[in-house]
Amino acid sequence: MSSDLHSLMAPYALDALDREEHERFEAHLAQCVDCQGELAGFTATAVRLGDAVSHTPPPALRDRLLAEIRTTPQERPVVTALAQRRSLRRTLPRLAMAAAFLVGTVGVGGYVVEHRNAQEVRTYDAAVERVLSSPDAQTIEKSFNAGGNVRMVMSPTANAAVIFANDLPDPGRGKVYQVWMIGDDGPASQGWFKKSDSMVMNDIKDADRVAVTVEPDGGSKQPTSAPIATIGI
Amino acid sequence: MARRKLLGKGTTVPEPAHLRLADAPAYAPEHVADLNDLLTRVGRGDEHAFAEVYDALAASVHGLARRVIRDPARAEEISQEVFIQVWQSATRFDASRGNAKSWVLTLAHRRAVDAVRHDQAATNRENKYDWSNGPDYDEVEETVTISLEHEQVRRCLDGLTQLQREAVTLAYYQGYTYAEVATALDANTATVKTRMRDGIVRLRDCMGVAS
């Protein structure tokens, strides 16, 4: 581990990195077994600091939570099982990992792997792993009556989301599906696809939702139709 | 805004105060195993297990949220979000890779720090053109004071140098980035990173955390 990154371990354990350095360190961490050992001790120490300031919450909070979970879906095990096997996956070639993940979840691994160069795949793979392995990652899925679904895994900690579109209906001749991230500054295009694809979206913190619209082939600068799906962040 | 004002140059940070002893938290192996088992059951949708996890960890999570966020109403909101997150993500908890309490408190701390930074950024945007009050550097003392319930943590914090202690507590209890800590303490960032590291290593050894 370089001394530069090494010096970020203590601030990381204390959550004292800004967003960019946090991501940089986590990307490194995913590949550095030695760091993980030392970090575990740092994290356990930080947890003890956290545990030293306990304060009993109002009783109403318990009631609200117990009511709320009754209507709150849990994450799907297909994603979670993969995230849990991080230690195993570390030993697999990263390219195979990306393919396995995509095939396993949405069946489009072949497309993605074939159409991105190796560097892109590595970057993409690291971003996907960062999102999936965050302790606060959550999954939202929208299915369509006409077939197909859109699934989004997002993590406030990683400040990123991965959206998977699986087998959506043909958008029509000369049309594509375009993905938008919508924040205070309006919709920002994240790219477009025809039927199935996945894409990583960074910097989700300032956005409040992601929308998918049908647009002319090549994509539009701004949405020109009502969204077929909207997912709140 | 008062929540995260930076310290002025030369401001001294008081020693942690208002300390009292409390029952030792559940670090005994049997408690760890129980909580791990409960959280695993939460991952399978067990609402009763969730209630038990809540009862075991609510005070820790809420205390941490209050410590970092300070505004009690906002802290309660964040505590609620944390436990909803626990419910949603417990499917991914792996008892062979870590313990439940650590998993939940790590999640809670990140969430609280994110919230305090997000709120501060919003306040800064609102105050962008408001110069009427002028810069304000001198009203933080009280926010650095730590109300520790755990004697060991207090004792171990006392064993740090002042700069180590300030670097660790400003970051962990107030959600400062190390760059903000450097500004607050009028030190350079490399020094602050080193002090954080030295501070954590010393705390870890003092608390008997396995390294």
Image (spheres, rainbow, N blue to C red):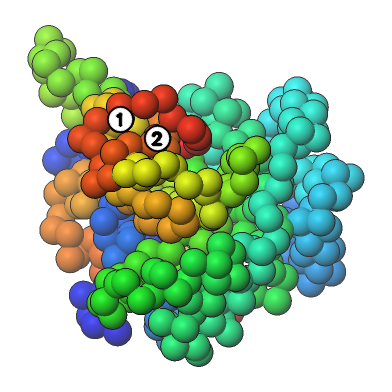
Name the residue at 44% across, 88% down. Answer: A93
Q: Which chain carries label 2?
A: A
* Subunit of label 1: A
**Residue B104 in picture, x, y percent from top left:** 63, 53
Compared across the picture, whether B97 is left or right of A225 comes to: right
Q: Is mark 2 on a helix, strand or loop?
A: strand
Q: Nearer the viewer, residue A46 or A209?
A: A209
Between A223 and B49, the residue placed more toward the observer is: A223
Q: Position of residue A165 (x, y in %)?
A: 49, 52
Q: Which of these two is toward me, B99 or A191?
A: A191
- The residue type indicated by label 2 comes to Thr
Q: Is residue A169 visible?
A: yes
Q: Residue at the far right: name it.
A: B48
Residue at mark 1 = A223
Which x, y percent locates residue A174? 32, 44
Disc 2 packing (10 Å; few <14; some 14–19; many ≥20) = many
Residue under the point 58% across and 28% down:
B77
Rendered residue at 23%/80% (across/down): A3
- In the rendered structure, are the residues bearing label 1 and label 2 in contact, judged by CB atoms less than 8 Å apart? yes
Q: Which amino acid does label 1 sit on?
A: Pro
Q: Which mark is residue A151?
A: none
Which residue corresponds to the image point at 55% horizontal and 67% vertical from the top-left?
Answer: A107
Q: In which quarter of the image is residue A35?
A: bottom left
Quadrant into which the N terminus of chain B falls: top left
Disc 2 target residue: A213
Residue A56: give x, y in percent of width and height: 70, 34
Relative height, residue A37 to residue B75 (above, below)? below
| Label 1 neighbour load within 10 Å: few <14, some 14-19, many 20+ | some
Describe residue A222's horizontal placement relative to residue A164 as left or right.
Answer: left
Please tell me which of labels 1 and 2 falls first in the chain. 2
Marks 1 & 2 on one chain: yes
Residue B206 showing in the rendered view: no
